[in-house]
Image: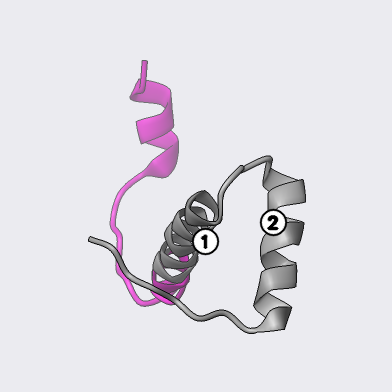
Amino acid sequence: MRTNVVLDDELIELIERARQLTGLKTKREIIHEALRTLIRLYEQAEIRNLRGKLKWEGDLHEQRLSSP
């Protein structure tokens, strides 16, 4: 699906910086990578927010010893 996006000058500069850092060649590649990274970061934050909220019963030491 084709979509046109209007970017302000600051974002255009960031695209150029992203190109230098990543080696990605096109704006399309950079935007795709940016969206994937944004989603991954938010998913990781959701997982971190679960810390201390889940109850787990088991013996971690025992599981580590029995793992191949």
Residue at the (69%, 56%) spot, across then down: 18
Mark 1 belongs to which amino acid?
Answer: Ala
Residue 62 image-quadrant placement: top left
Residue 2 at x, y percent in the picture? 28, 63
Residue 7 at x, y percent in the picture? 57, 79
Residue at the (61%, 43%) spot, across then down: 24
Q: Report how far apart the C-alphas of labels 2 and 1 lie in the structure.
A: 9 Å
Residue 64 at x, y percent in the picture? 42, 30
Foreground residue among 26 and 33: 26
**Element type at mark 1:** helix
Q: What stretch is highlighted in magenta?
A: 44-68
Q: Do the residues labelled 2 and 1 touch (CB within 8 Å)?
A: yes
Residue 47 at x, y percent in the picture? 40, 67
Foreground residue among 62 and 16: 16
Is-magenta flag for residue 61?
yes
Q: In this view, does 17 lie to the left or right of 50?
A: right
- Crowd band around label 1 with a 10 angstrom C-alpha radius: few (<14), some (14–19), many (20+): some
Name which of mark 2 and mark 1 comes first in the sequence. 2
Residue at the extreme left of the image, as rendered = 1
Q: In this view, does 18 lie to the left or right of 55?
A: right
Foreground residue among 12 and 57: 12
Mark 2 belongs to which amino acid?
Answer: Ala
Whether 54 is drawn above or below 32: the answer is below
Q: Label 2, on which residue?
A: 18
Residue 23 image-quadrant placement: top right
Residue 25 image-quadrant placement: top right
Q: Label 1, on which residue?
A: 34
Q: Which mark is residue 7?
A: none
User: The C terminus appears in which quarter of the rendering?
Assistant: top left
**Element type at mark 2:** helix
